[in-house]
Amino acid sequence: MVRLAQESASVPLAEHAERVRSTQRAMAERGLDAMLIVSPENIYYLVGLDHQGYFAFTMLILHVESEPVLVSRAMERSTVAAQVPGCVHEAFEDDEDPTAAAIRAVNSSVPAGSRVGIELDTMFFPPRIVRGLMEEVHNVEWADASGLVEQLRAVKSPTELTWVRAAALASDEAMRAGIEAARPGVSEREIAAAVYHQLVRSGSEYPGFAPLIRSNGNLLQEHVTWSGRRLASGDMLFLELSASVRRYHAPLTRMVHFDKLPPRTSDVAEIALAGLEEIRQNLRPGAVVGDVYDAWQRIVDEGLGHKLYRRHHCGYAVGIGYPPSWVGGSTVVGIRRGGHFVVREGMVFHVLSWIIGQEPADYVVSDTAVVTAEGCELLTATPREPLIV
C-alpha cells in the first residue's frame, strides 16, 4: 500500500491514507493494477499536492500496492518534497518533453502485463502525451478509468464538510461585502475589489473560478465577469461567487437592484424562491437527480404559466476545485432533466433557481447545499428576497 511519510497541511494523515486505500480497492474491482491520474482535484484529494503549478503537466501514478510516482516539472521539487514526500518524484526539466517523462515513469514503475487505467475525460491530459504513452508503452493493457476517483470524492467526509461550511461562511461574508459596495456611480470593478478583499479576509484561498459580477447588458452571458462599467439608478447587478477553504468551494448567487425594482420582479422572485425550496425538499438521500430537476421545473412552469422555459440544470455537485473551475473537474455532475445520478448523504451541491430572459422580469438565486440524513441543508444564508440599494 501507499506510504505517506508525513501529515498533509490540509488533510489528516489517516484520511489521506483511507482515500488512497478506497481508490486502490476501486481499482482492484475494475481489474486495474495501476492508474494514471492527472486531474488536479484528484491528485490533491489523494496525496495533498496543493499549489498553482498544475498549469504544467502533472501526473500521479497510483499502484494497487507499491508507492505512487508523481511526474511534474523539476522546478516543483521543493514543493513535492514538502507536501508529498511519500511519492517518488519523476521530474522533467523545462527543455524536456513531458511526454518522455511520463513514458519513463510508466516504464520504470508499472510491471509488464499490467492493466493501467487512464483519466481520458479531463482537460489536463494533453492528447500528445496520451498518444505518446499509447505508442511507446507496449507492455501494458490500457483502460479508460475516467470518473473512478470522482465517484469516491462525491461523498464528503466530516472533515471535508467542515471546510465546505467554512467556505460557505466566507462566501456569505464576501457576498455581503459586494452588496454593501453596490450603489449608483460605483463600477463593477470596484465591487469586484470589495468581494476579493473580503474573500481573503474571511479565510478564503484563491477560488477555482473568478467571481461573476455583471449588470444589465450582459446578464445572459453566463461566464462573463466585471468590467469598468459604472452602475446607474435602475440597473441590476448579478453576483455569483465562491470562497475556497482548503480547496473546498461553496458558491451562491444573488441579485441587486439600484433604487427600484423593475415591474413584477417580486412576482418572479416568488417563483424562483419557491423553486429553490422545491429543490431543497427533494434533494435527499436516495433521490434521483432527474426527479429533483422535474420537481423544480414544475414549480417554474406553474409560476410562469407556460412550459417554454428550460435550463440545462438546476444545480451541480461542488467540492474541491482548482482553476479554471469550482465544480471540481472538467465535467459537471448536474441536477438535470433525465439525470440518473442517485443522491447520497454527504454530497454537496450548488443549487440554482434562475429565471432569466423571461417575461416579465429576471431573478436569480442559488446556494450551496449539503445532503444530510434528514434531507438537505442550505449552507449559504445571505438574504434571498429582492434587494434594493
Image (cartoon, rainbow, N blue to C red):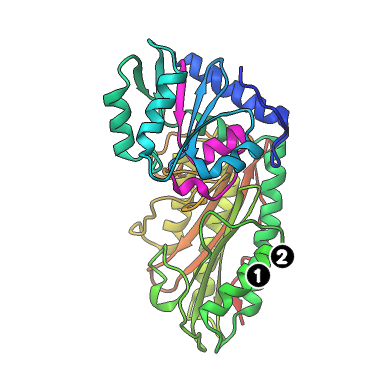
| Residue behind mark 2 | 201
Answer whether residue 131 is visible to the viewer in this image: yes
> Which quadrant of the view contains residue 374?
top right
Question: Which residue appears farthest toward the top when viewing the image?
Answer: 113
Mark 2 secondary-structure assignment:
helix
User: Does residue 344 appear left or right of residue 362 in this picture?
Assistant: right
Q: Residue at x 72, y 27 (%)?
A: 14
Name the amino acid, label 1: His
As drawn, the label of residue 197 is 1
Mark 1 secondary-structure assignment:
helix
Q: Nearer the viewer, residue 40 or 332?
A: 40
Q: Assess whether residue 51 is covered by the magenta stretch.
A: yes
Residue 254 percent across, percent down from the top left? 57, 67
> Which quadrant of the view contains residue 9?
top right
Residue 293 percent across, percent down from the top left? 46, 46
Q: How many marks?
A: 2
Crowd around label 1: few <14 · some 14–19 · many ≥20 (10 Å): some
User: Does residue 179 appear left or right of residue 123 in this picture?
Assistant: right
Seen in the picture, residue 328 relative to 386 is either above or below; the reply is above
**Residue stretch in magenta:** 33-56
Q: Residue at x 33, y 35 (%)?
A: 129
Q: Residue at x 42, y 43 (%)?
A: 331
Label 1, label 2: how far apart the Cα atoms are: 6 Å
In the rendered structure, are the residues bearing label 1 and label 2 in contact, judged by CB atoms less than 8 Å apart? yes
Residue 80 percent across, percent down from the top left? 59, 38
Considering the image in quadrants, where does the N terminus appear?
Answer: top right
Seen in the picture, residue 88 relative to 372 is either above or below; the reply is above
> Which quadrant of the view contains residue 100?
top left
Residue 267 percent across, percent down from the top left? 51, 71
As drawn, the label of residue 57 is none
